[in-house]
């Protein structure tokens, strides 16, 4: 009798529709919060390679925020103004494909990430996002010798090493080049002076044997810098700001 009431009763059918509408409303509200918080304020990233050794290891997990440099709004192509700018020594998340992807793709990608629990993604940016170290700022002249960067800040008469100018301490892996490897060959330990233009930054890996950084890309625009690294939350034994 009760089953028939649920099947034929208008009241029961109405209650069922309201139940499903509540579920949909809850899912939509959860997705909206997930998207806005992750896009505008705070999210996480997992290091999937060894390019930032020795201080940052593969598998390390970080809390990052797009807010300091200006978050990119979902479904819109412009970025909000941020209260800060990248500084020398900062760790940043680089996503060189995000600014060139369509707004619709980014929105659909948010849906896929949400309903898959961050296990799947459509955006190429999800695979290309990586951590890099800020060494050069707009107007700086950057050069490299022995895998160590030297920077002449805009308006200054002389250059200093990257470590002298950085706001935080960090270490680098300096590889040994094969015998006879000339400075004019690709992936050498030297770089001729490069002056950065307005809105351009020079980003490098801490492991200088890795070449997927500004030594190959050239200067990186602010639109390709997606977020600032705030702190490492895993492994817990190295919890805190990644100064090394």
Image: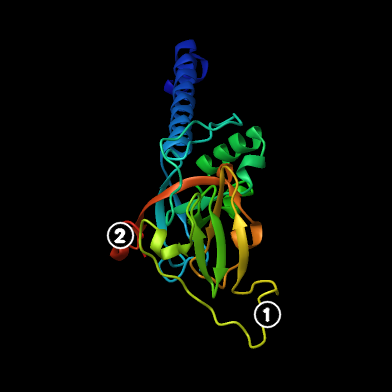
Q: Name which of mark 2 and mark 1 comes first in the sequence.
A: 1
Quarter containing the C terminus: bottom left
Q: Residues within 10 Å of mark 2 (few under 14, many from 20)?
A: some
- The secondary structure type at the circle numbered 1 is loop
Q: Residue sitting at 43 percent across and 38 percent down?
A: 67
Quarter containing the N terminus: top left
Residue 231 spot, x, y in % from top left: 35, 53
Viewer-closest of 201 and 97? 201
Q: Residue sitting at 41 percent across and 37 percent down?
A: 41
Residue 214 spot, x, y in % from top left: 60, 58
Looking at the image, the residue that sits furthest to the bottom is: 179
Viewer-closest of 59 and 76? 76
User: Is any part of residue 219 visible from this angle?
Assistant: yes
- The secondary structure type at the circle numbered 2 is loop
User: Is any part of residue 4 visible from this angle?
Assistant: no
Please, is residue 111 above or below residue 150 in the view?
Answer: above
Tell me the CA gap for discs 2 and 1. Answer: 41 Å
Q: Residues within 10 Å of mark 1 (few under 14, many from 20)?
A: few
Counting labels gives 2
Q: Residue tagged by mark 1?
A: 182
Residue 48 spot, x, y in % from top left: 51, 62
Find residue 67 and name its label.
none
Please, is residue 40 above or below residue 124 in the view?
Answer: above
Q: Residue tagged by mark 2?
A: 239
Position of 85 with respect to 236 (left or right) is: right
> Which colour scheme appears in the figure?
rainbow
């Amino acid at each position: 009798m009760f089953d028939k009431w649920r099947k034929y009763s208008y009241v029961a059918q109405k209650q069922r529709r309201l139940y499903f509408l509540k579920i949909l409303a809850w899912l939509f509200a959860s997705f909206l919060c997930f998207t806005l918080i992750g896009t505008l304020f705070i999210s996480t990233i997992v290091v999937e390679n060894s390019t930032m050794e020795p201080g940052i290891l593969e598998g390390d997990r970080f809390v990052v925020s797009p807010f300091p440099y200006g978050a990119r709004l979902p479904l819109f192509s412009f970025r909000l103004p941020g209260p800060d700018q990248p500084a020398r020594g900062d760790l940043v998340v680089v996503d060189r494909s995000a600014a060139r992807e369509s707004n619709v793709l980014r929105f659909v990608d948010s849906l896929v990430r949400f309903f898959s629990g961050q296990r799947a993604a459509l955006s190429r940016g999800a695979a290309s996002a990586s951590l890099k170290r800020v060494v050069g700022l707009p107007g700086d002249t950057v050069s490299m010798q022995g895998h160590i960067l030297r920077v002449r800040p805009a308006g200054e008469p002389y250059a200093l090493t990257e470590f002298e100018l950085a706001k935080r301490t960090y270490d680098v892996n300096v590889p040994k080049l094969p015998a006879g490897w000339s400075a004019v060959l690709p992936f050498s330990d030297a770089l001729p002076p490069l002056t950065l233009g307005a809105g351009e930054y020079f980003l490098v890996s801490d492991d200088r044997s890795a070449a997927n950084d500004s030594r190959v890309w050239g200067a990186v625009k602010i639109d390709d810098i997606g977020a600032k690294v705030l702190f490492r939350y895993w492994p817990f034994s190295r919890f805190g700001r990644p100064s090394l």
